[in-house]
């Protein structure tokens, strides 16, 4: 299983910026010019609990990865440069 703590660490590794808003933490990815690329959110109440497969899939979709690619990012083989290559291949301005 994957914990919310691990997901937060992965967002940091992939160079997402954390934005504090209401009852959720928003994570935004911006390009070198500061332009918005994509975003996702996590509940503040999540703590260190495990993430369901359904939610893991939703977060992966939000950041334009497959569930398998997102698991690789969490497990370390996918770093931010590899992630940026995936986004560029999909046409994101990163």
Image: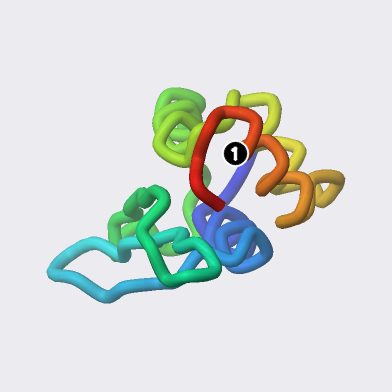
Q: Is residue 47 left or right of residue 24?
A: right
| Helix, strand or loop under label 1 | helix
In the visual, does 44 lie left or right of 10? left
How many marks overall? 1
Using the image as rendered, state which of residue 56 and residue 48 is in the foreground.
Answer: 56
Left or right: 50 as drawn, with respect to 75:
left
**Residue 9, position in %: x, y?**
62, 65
Q: From the viewer's perspective, tell me whether residue 44 is left or right of residue 29.
A: left
Q: Which residue lies most toward the left here? A: 22
Instruction: Name the residue at 40% across, 72% down.
Output: 18
Residue 30 on image: x %, y %: 45, 63
Give whichever of 94, 42 is nearer the camera. Answer: 94
Identified at 76% across, 54% down, the residue is 81
Check disc 1 and report the residue beneath it: 87
- Identify which residue is drawn at 44% across, 38% down: 59
* Quadrant including the N terminus: top right
Say few, some or many: other residues with alpha carbon within 10 Å of mark 1 (under 14 / 14 to 19 / 20 or more): some
What is the image's colouring? Answer: rainbow
Q: Nearer the viewer, residue 38 or 78?
A: 38
Q: What is the x, y in percent for residue 7?
A: 56, 54
Residue at screen point 50% across, 47% down: 93
């Amino acid at each position: 299983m994957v914990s919310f703590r691990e997901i937060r660490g992965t967002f940091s590794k992939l160079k997402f910026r954390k934005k504090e808003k209401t009852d959720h933490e928003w994570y935004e990815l911006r390009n070198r010019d500061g332009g918005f690329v994509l975003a996702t959110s996590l509940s503040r109440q999540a703590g260190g609990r495990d993430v369901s497969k359904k939610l893991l899939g939703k977060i992966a979709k939000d950041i334009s990865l497959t569930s398998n690619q997102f698991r690789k990012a969490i497990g370390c083989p996918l770093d931010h440069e590899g992630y940026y290559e995936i986004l560029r291949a999909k046409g994101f301005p990163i």
